[in-house]
Amino acid sequence: MLQPSRPRRTKWDSQVRKLFMKNLAAPKENRPGEWLVVVEIVVRRDGRVRRSSIRQSSGFAAADAAAMLMLKKTARLPAFTPDMNGSERKLTMPVMFVSKGSAAGR
């Protein structure tokens, strides 16, 4: 049986991702490379974040710290819409940092 490769994103999911991206800043240490941090967020029906964590580290502490700061800055999210079931929802979100480094280091 065929299954879709990705679940369809809801309007709520899109709003939440936009809020997180709005609070995302580059890592404090600017080093050339690409780093993928996978974060996990548990959100209650009223939009409060119950738990947030790094599910997969990038291996670059500054990128991991930037992802955690993004989560901390986004402590309140939209309340669930009436059609959303359950008392909470777990979101797993990849956060990619790409940097060519600073001109001073060349």
Image (cartoon, helix red, strand yellow):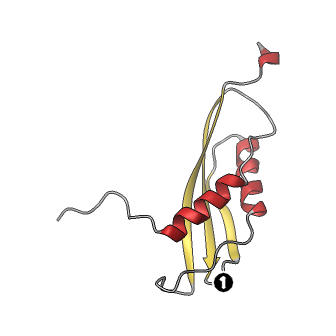
Q: Report the quarter where the N terminus lies.
A: bottom left
Residue 100 image offset from top left, x and y in percent = 67, 24
Q: What residue is drawn where x is 66% and y is 58%? A: 20
> Quick check: 6 above or below 46?
above
Q: Looking at the picture, tell me which residue is in the foreground, 91 or 59.
A: 91
Q: Is residue 54 visible?
A: no
Q: Position of residue 101 (x, y in %)?
A: 72, 24
Q: Quadrant of residue 45?
A: bottom right
Q: Is residue 94 above or below residue 78?
A: above
Which image quadrant for residue 62?
top right
Q: Position of residue 93 (x, y in %)?
A: 56, 57
Secondary structure category for the residue under label 1:
loop
Q: Is residue 89 left or right of residue 104?
A: left
Residue type marked 1:
Asp
- 73 or 105, which lies in front? 73
Q: Quadrant of the C terminus?
A: top right
Determine if residue 6 is in view: yes
| Residue at x-position 57% and y-position 87% | 87
Residue at left offset 37%, top offset 59%: 6
Position above or below: 46 against 97: below
**Extreme-top residue of the structure:** 106
Q: Which residue is mark 1?
A: 46
